[in-house]
Amino acid sequence: MNLAHCMRSTHRFAFRVSHFYDQAMPTQKHRRRQSASAPPTGAGSSPSSLLQQRSLELPAGTQLPKVSLRSVRLHPHLFRKLVDKVDPSARPGDLVAVYTPQGELLGHGLYNPRAEIAVRMLTFGDAAPGPAFWDAHLSRAVELRRDVLRLDSVTDAYRVVHAEADGLSGLVVDRYGDVLSAEVFSLAMFQRSQAILARLGKLLHTSHTIVQVPVQSHGQEGFLAEPVCSPGLPEDVVINEFGTKFRVRFEEGHKTGFFCDQRDNRRRLAEFCAGRTVLDLCCYTGGFALQAKRLGNAADVTAVDLDEKAIALARDNARLNQQKVNFVHADVFGYMRDVIANGRTFDVVVLDPPKLIRNRRELEEGTRTHLDLNRLAVQLVADGGIFLSCCCSGLLAETEFLRLLHTAARQAGRPAGREGAAWQPRRSLQILARTGAAPDHPVATDCPETEYLKAVWMRVVHEQH
């Protein structure tokens, strides 16, 4: 993939959604289908002046535009309703000085009048963030991954910058071998992305970069941008995770190309798999399935996903590792219902669906979809088997997710409208552990929203009526 091809290529999202999800959430379905081929209708591309790259240097000889607040919030996100007055000179993406209602300097942030998050704070205090600020934050981020977590000893794929948790709101960067893959959720961060990645590349000694903007940023930040790639960016790279190889394709992948956040959960799952049958639902490119087989020595592994390209890449990953996995291209709802009807169960079941709740408007329908997925999945777990259920929707609180899992288990086994059908045993769940994202996805104490992934490890016990 050369630079010209990358700039012509429209940002794509491979979609891993079931027919049920399509019907339950038609607006989301419509957005995803548009993003696979073109920007949203009427959106077009953002003006080139808006997308122009900026330096990390402080403006010379001029005062920063001033933003005054109605009330103080010590959080990296300052919403539009908190903003009282803004200097007329402030432009989208500008670095601004933020003042309290009493006229005291609160700190500095990146301004976007088009966004609901009008200011993304970088610093609290007097010092304005210049090159030294960016260098310090990037160095600390790299130090955490390489010196503290020592990730280079087990993988060459990990998150290097985790947005607010690394003090850089609106930016995530993953390393895949020689490539830095960034996803930006902020106009100001997009404008500074090339300068940031240049500095980060020197710290990590990487050669290539790609910057992508999720399609929802048009509604949230008021801009669209096609992927920006460094010259000579390869179409894919092969990364290593605990000795298992995975191919990462940048143009067709979700988010930055791979899900590093489940790294430790994939290894942990392998501990339950020796000699057992395993089912990986919403398998994407085969992460859990391959680690269950290669690290866990599972007797038989089946993996299911609706995304045809993801399944093709998962099969490629199995060949890379010389492992036999039964990959199934199917809607997981239909697949689960068929397996239940045939009376088959598995010793270990993993359910790791895509993000079903992207905003509060989708909370009710997304929660219902999670419930329906888990109600079916728990019926596929053998008596005494292991069930790992995951949720990457940060808006669904852990307490609600646990309540949902309990409800799913109690409702499991009801005959689905089939007259004369026998009841299956009910299920009870024993929670063995609750985990989240790998530690290269840290949580900021002043921004709890950075904790999003929930992984609940359960033993399933069948109860006779």
Image (spheres, rainbow, N blue to C red):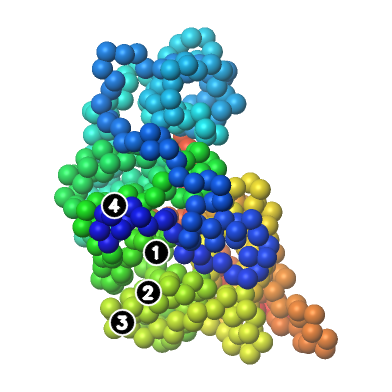
Q: Mark 2 sits on what residue? A: 313
Q: For the C terminus, give its image quadrant.
A: bottom right
Q: Earlier in the sequence, mark 1 or mark 2?
A: 1
Residue 131 x %, y % = 24, 29
State if disc 2 and disc 1 touch (CB < 8 Å): yes
Q: Which disc number belongs to residue 319?
A: 3
Q: Earlier in the sequence, mark 3 or mark 2?
A: 2
Q: Earlier in the sequence, mark 4 or mark 1?
A: 4
Q: Is residue 188 above or below residue 173?
A: above
Q: Nearer the viewer, mark 2 or mark 4?
A: 4
Q: Secondary structure at mark 2?
A: helix
Sort mark 2 into few (<14), some (14-19) or many (20+) by Cα contacts within 10 Å: some
The residue located at (76%, 80%) in the rendering is 415
Q: Mark 4 sits on what residue? A: 229
Q: CA distance from mark 1 to mark 3?
A: 20 Å
Three-letter amino acid code at the position of disc 1: Glu
Q: Nearer the viewer, mark 1 or mark 2?
A: 1
Q: Mark 1 sits on what residue? A: 252
State if disc 4 and disc 3 touch (CB < 8 Å): no
Q: CA distance from mark 4 to mark 1?
A: 14 Å
Three-letter amino acid code at the position of disc 2: Leu
Three-letter amino acid code at the position of disc 3: Arg
The residue located at (33%, 45%) in the rendering is 161
Q: Earlier in the sequence, mark 3 or mark 4?
A: 4
In the rendered image, the residue lying farthest to the right is: 419
Q: For the N terminus, give its image quadrant.
A: bottom left
